[in-house]
Image (cartoon, rainbow, N blue to C red):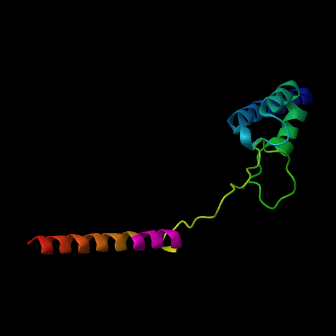
């Protein structure tokens, strides 16, 4: 009887953990690559399943403020070099200056055209 219960628990752990590993995105698997977790759970269903549940699954709520959880598989991105550009055009002094300069040029061109038409008439 005891062996039947252990076999049933082992089978349930195997099925649950294999499906959980397959559905988990690669970037969220912790501490080992996804394929190694799968092999560990298939070869050793009970200890491998417990290890997956404790050390391999993604942390609920994402990685924030908790203890070190190992590698997530993704390399950290370095910030892009270069000047910080305002996202709102009203905050960008260069943009506003270019608009002002363009408006001045259009005013001068319109004034010149009016003078030429007045002289030609």
Q: Along the line of sight, which residue is nearer the eye, 15 or 100?
A: 100
User: Residue farthest to the left?
Assistant: 121
Vertical order, 72 against 91 (above or below): above
Q: Quadrant of the C terminus?
A: bottom left
Q: In this rendering, does residue 11 appear at all? A: no
* 103 lies left or right of 94: left
Residue at figure coordinates x 85%, y 41% from the top left? 31
Give coordinates of residue 17: x percent, y percent. 77, 35
Q: In this rendering, does residue 78 appear at all? A: yes
Q: Along the line of sight, which residue is nearer the eye, 73 or 64?
A: 73
Q: Quadrant of the N terminus?
A: top right
* 23 lies left or right of 46: left
Determine if the magenta segment contains residue 5: no
Residue at figure coordinates x 14%, y 71% from the top left? 117
Give coordinates of residue 5: x percent, y percent. 86, 31
Give coordinates of residue 34: x percent, y percent. 78, 33
Vertical order, 21 against 113 (above or below): above
The image quarter in which residue 46 lies: top right
Q: Specify start and end residues of the magenta stretch as a single range.
A: 92-101
Determine if the magenta segment contains residue 93: yes
Q: Along the line of sight, which residue is nearer the eye, 15 or 22?
A: 22
Vertical order, 23 against 111 (above or below): above
* 82 lies left or right of 36: left
Give coordinates of residue 53: x percent, y percent. 82, 42
Residue at figure coordinates x 73%, y 50% from the top left? 77
Vertical order, 57 against 78 (above or below): above
User: Residue farthest to the top?
Assistant: 43
Of helix, strand and loop, which mostly describes the magenta segment?
helix
């Amino acid at each position: 009887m005891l062996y039947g219960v252990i076999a049933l628990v082992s089978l349930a752990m195997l099925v649950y953990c294999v499906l959980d590993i397959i559905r988990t995105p690669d970037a969220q698997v912790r501490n080992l690559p996804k394929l190694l977790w799968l092999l560990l759970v298939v070869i050793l269903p009970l200890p491998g399943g417990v290890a997956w549940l404790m050390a391999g699954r993604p942390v609920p709520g994402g990685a924030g403020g908790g203890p070190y959880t190992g590698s997530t598989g993704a390399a950290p991105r370095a910030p892009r070099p270069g000047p910080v550009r305002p996202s709102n055009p009203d905050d960008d002094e260069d943009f506003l200056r270019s608009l002002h300069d363009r408006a001045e040029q259009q005013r001068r061109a319109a004034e010149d055209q009016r003078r030429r038409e007045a002289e030609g008439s």
